[in-house]
Image (cartoon, rainbow, N blue to C red):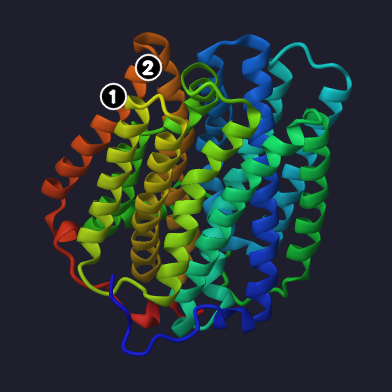
């Protein structure tokens, strides 16, 4: 990681009003969702004791996401991105209120939870491309790198605090978690509505298969973009150990909801500290090596997590996994945004979201299935080893990416 010739204040980007409202709205929304995730995971595992059901939590969110994401990408290029984000946050609020209502009614079966997660996955499908595409419209080009780093660090702060708060509030029962998280989502919706409509290219192309798939064709035509986002897909697909954290906490590490909250927070702590560093000392050289190195660290951390039965060692492993993942995410996001014209940025972001979603939710489902077949610790070890294999294979298949020295800093491509 190397600093630019003059390292300026990494928080100076907050002087841009639209970015600040967007940042706080998204951070509060992420915080609320992370709190809900702790309650959902613990509630489902307490009811069924079935590892496979933990995997289904991810699948219930990913299936509608996969079906809708390309259409959502076209919507992000055709309609106001701010309104799409506000609507998606409102849908997430409805999910939180539904979970609260189910819990008050005395939930005894898991299918209502999965039904709510389907709605959540649908909302996230429309939110993902819009949030990725709107950021470049909220700040001037020279502040874009700082905005990416600060936005990432804020999201990871929410990932840190959310599970911890979720675990603490769960002491008073899941109703408290859902009540507090729903209140946060109300504020999040209001803040997003305060963002002034931002300028974006007018795109009134009808939603045909040709226009919807434009982002996919663009990604296929750019080896750097294809290699960057597919690396995340196939590497993290096998490293979705976070889906198994409720079982690891209960059966291997022997800790309760508070311990689970700390475990879920550890990757966010590593990622947040790393992203704050990137806001002040951005990566400018050997960007390909940094990205592949970050994924390799993620794989090694997963191996340590699967091999240990010590709570502190597990926390350290998850912390390093978060740092490695943050470096990879930072490089990939800048590569995709610098390479993509704004008039198709929503559709390209949708393709990127498919890869990210597959590596997360589908990875969680894969972890649940392999845990059911191999056993809990063997499944985590298998995931870490597979991540390292994919990292080496992708470095060989995409040498233009692994040997890349600098970002393609064509500022014209990121001018709103």
Foreground: disc 2 or disc 1: 1
- Whether residue 358 is visible, yes or no, is no
Disc nearer the start of the sequence (2/1): 2
Placement of 289 over or under 61, stated as above or below:
below
Placement of 69 over or under 403, stated as above or below:
above
**Residue drawn 71% across the image and 29% down it:** 116
**Residue drawn 65% across the image and 19% down it:** 44
**Secondary structure state at the residue bearing disc 1:** helix
> Residue 314's quadrant in the figure?
top left
Q: Residues within 10 Å of mark 1 (few under 14, many from 20)?
A: some
Measure the alpha-carbon separation of dots 2 and 1.
9 Å
226 and 261: which one is in front? 261
Measuring from the top left, give residue 289's x and y in whole percent: 20, 59
Q: Quadrant of the N terminus?
A: bottom left
Q: Are the residues at dot 2 and dot 1 in contact (C-beta closer than 8 Å)?
A: yes
> Residue 236's quadrant in the figure?
top left
> Would residue 136 be found to the left or right of residue 82 on screen?
left
Measuring from the top left, give residue 298's x and y in whole percent: 33, 43
The residue wearing badge 2 is 370
The residue wearing badge 1 is 382
> Would residue 140 be found to the left or right of residue 285 on screen?
right
> Would residue 134 be found to the left or right of residue 348 on screen?
right
Measuring from the top left, give residue 7's x and y in whole percent: 40, 85
Placement of 203 over or under 60, stated as above or below:
below
102 and 226: which one is in front? 102
- Whether residue 235 is visible, yes or no, is yes
38 and 361: which one is in front? 38
Which residue of the protein is positioned furthest toward the right in this rendering?
105
**Residue drawn 30% across the image and 37% down it:** 234
- Which labelled disc corresponds to residue 218? none
Placement of 77 over or under 384, stated as above or below:
below
């Amino acid at each position: 990681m190397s600093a630019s010739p003059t390292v300026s204040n990494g928080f100076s980007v907050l002087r841009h009003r639209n970015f600040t409202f967007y940042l706080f709205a998204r951070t509060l929304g992420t915080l609320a969702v992370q709190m809900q995730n702790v309650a959902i995971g613990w509630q489902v595992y307490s009811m069924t004791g079935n590892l496979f059901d933990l995997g289904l939590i991810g699948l219930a969110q990913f299936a509608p996401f996969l079906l809708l994401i390309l259409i959502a990408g076209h919507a992000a290029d055709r309609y106001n991105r701010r309104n799409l984000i506000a609507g998606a946050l409102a849908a997430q609020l409805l999910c939180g209120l539904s979970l609260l209502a189910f819990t008050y009614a005395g939930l005894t079966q898991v299918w209502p939870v999965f039904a709510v997660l389907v709605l959540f996955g649908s909302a996230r499908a429309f939110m993902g491309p819009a949030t990725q595409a709107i950021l470049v419209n909220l700040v001037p080009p020279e502040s874009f790198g700082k905005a990416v780093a600060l936005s990432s660090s804020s999201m990871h702060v929410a990932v840190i605090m959310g599970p911890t708060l979720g675990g603490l509030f769960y002491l008073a029962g899941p109703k408290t978690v859902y009540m507090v998280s729903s209140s946060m989502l109300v504020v999040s919706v209001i803040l997003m509505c305060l963002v002034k409509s931002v300028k974006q290219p007018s795109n009134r192309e009808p939603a045909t298969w040709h226009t919807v798939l434009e982002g996919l064709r663009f990604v296929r035509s750019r080896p750097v973009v294809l290699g960057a986002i597919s690396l995340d897909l196939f590497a993290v697909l096998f490293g979705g150990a976070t889906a198994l954290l409720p079982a690891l906490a209960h059966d291997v590490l022997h800790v309760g909801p508070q311990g689970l909250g700390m475990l879920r927070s550890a990757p966010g702590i590593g990622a947040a500290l790393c992203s704050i560093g990137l806001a002040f000392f951005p990566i400018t050289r050997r960007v390909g090596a940094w990205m592949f190195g970050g994924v390799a660290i993620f794989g090694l951390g997963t191996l340590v997590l699967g091999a240990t039965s010590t709570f502190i060692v597990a926390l350290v492993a998850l912390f390093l996994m978060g740092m490695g993942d943050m470096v990879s995410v930072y490089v990939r996001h800048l590569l995709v945004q610098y390479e993509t014209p704004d008039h198709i940025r929503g559709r390209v972001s949708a393709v990127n979201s498919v890869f990210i979603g597959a590596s997360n939710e589908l990875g969680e489902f894969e972890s649940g299935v392999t845990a059911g077949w191999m056993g809990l610790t063997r499944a985590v070890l298998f995931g870490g080893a597979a991540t390292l294999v994919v990292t080496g294979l992708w470095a060989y298949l995409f040498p233009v990416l692994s040997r890349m020295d600098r970002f393609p800093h064509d500022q014209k491509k990121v001018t709103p």
